[in-house]
Image (cartoon, helix red, strand yellow):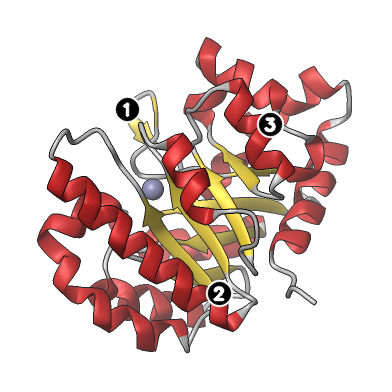
Amino acid sequence: MTDPTEYVDAHCHLDLFPDPAALVRRIDERRVHTIAVTNAPSVFGHTERLAASSRYVRAAAGLHPELVATHGGELDQLWPCLERTRYVGEVGLDFSTNDAALRTRQRTVFEKILERCAAFRDKTITVHSRRASSDTIDTIGERFPGKVILHWFTGSRREVERAARLGLYFSINPAMVNSQKGRELVDAMPRDRVLTESDGPFVKLGPQPADPTSAPIVLNYLARTWHLEVEQVARAVLANLERSVQREV
Ligand SMILES: [Zn+2]
């Protein structure tokens, strides 16, 4: 049977799967529009080549906040990558570290990345904000000229509302809909700002990593809470993705 539905995975670490090329084939078969994030500029080329072979995979250039300590020196290598893709990630802040100097360094790196992205006006950025939700929203600010997707957001309901007012998007993974707190936040997100993500291979479904083909898990949850058919939710999420990658005018 063919599945007519197209899906969305707005945050997947394609390059960290054991056989990325095989996963790309499954993504294309299942028609999952996938933003393949990368954690350091030195590995972007690999994902860029994988994306070139696919209709559905888009390569994102990033520098993960948890790698700023070890790979922060690669920041200058990020700038030429930004000329080659409109997708950026994984970037952001991770304040699970108590090291004040490292937090400051993360913030400086994130600010520089946002500043460079702002000049293009057409970037879609997938952002990490663990234990730093408020700081992350403040750093993005009110006037960022581009689209921002808060991935696996774990802040408060008030912060969800604030981010929504600023026009930010949220990408939701199976781990979020499998936790009480995650569901409370998801329920506070405006329907026109919601995307699906796997964050595979970090998010697990039992022993297996979630991957782009896991999108129906989140869609099923949204269909139940929104009182819609799964296909209607899938179309809404796809429309949200299209808006989240449109150029600012
Ligand atoms: Zn991630």
* Between 2 and 33, the one nearer to me in the picture: 33
Q: Which mark is residue 207?
A: 1
Name the residue nearer the viewer: 129 or 176. Answer: 129
Q: Mark 3 = which residue?
A: 161
Mark-to-mark CA distance, 1 and 2? 40 Å
At label 3, the amino acid type is Glu
Q: Is residue 45 above or below residue 176?
A: below
Residue at figure coordinates x 35%, y 44% from the top left: 201
Q: Is residue 210 above or below residue 29?
A: above
Local packing at callout 1 (Cα closer than 10 Å; few below 14, some 14-19, many 20+) is: few
The quadrant of the image that shows the C terminus is bottom right
- State the image coordinates of residue 94 (x, y, percent, origin top left): 30, 42
Kindly report the distance in space between the C-alpha atoms of the residues bearing marks 2 and 3: 23 Å
Query: Given the image, on which type of amino acid does mark 1 rest?
Result: Pro
Q: 16 or 119, which is in the foreground?
A: 119
Which of pointers 1 and 2 lies earlier in the amino acid sequence?
Answer: 2
Q: Based on the displayed image, in which of its 4 quarters is residue 231 positioned?
A: top right
Mark 3 Cα shell of 10 Å, populated few (<14), some (14-19), many (≥20): some
Q: Residue at x 48, y 65 (%)?
A: 24
Residue designated by label 2:
118
Local SS, label 2: helix
User: How far apart, in angstroms, are the residues tagged by discs 3 and 1?
Assistant: 34 Å
- Snapshot quadrant of residue 76: bottom left
3 or 1: mark nearer the eye: 3
Amino acid beneath label 2:
Ala
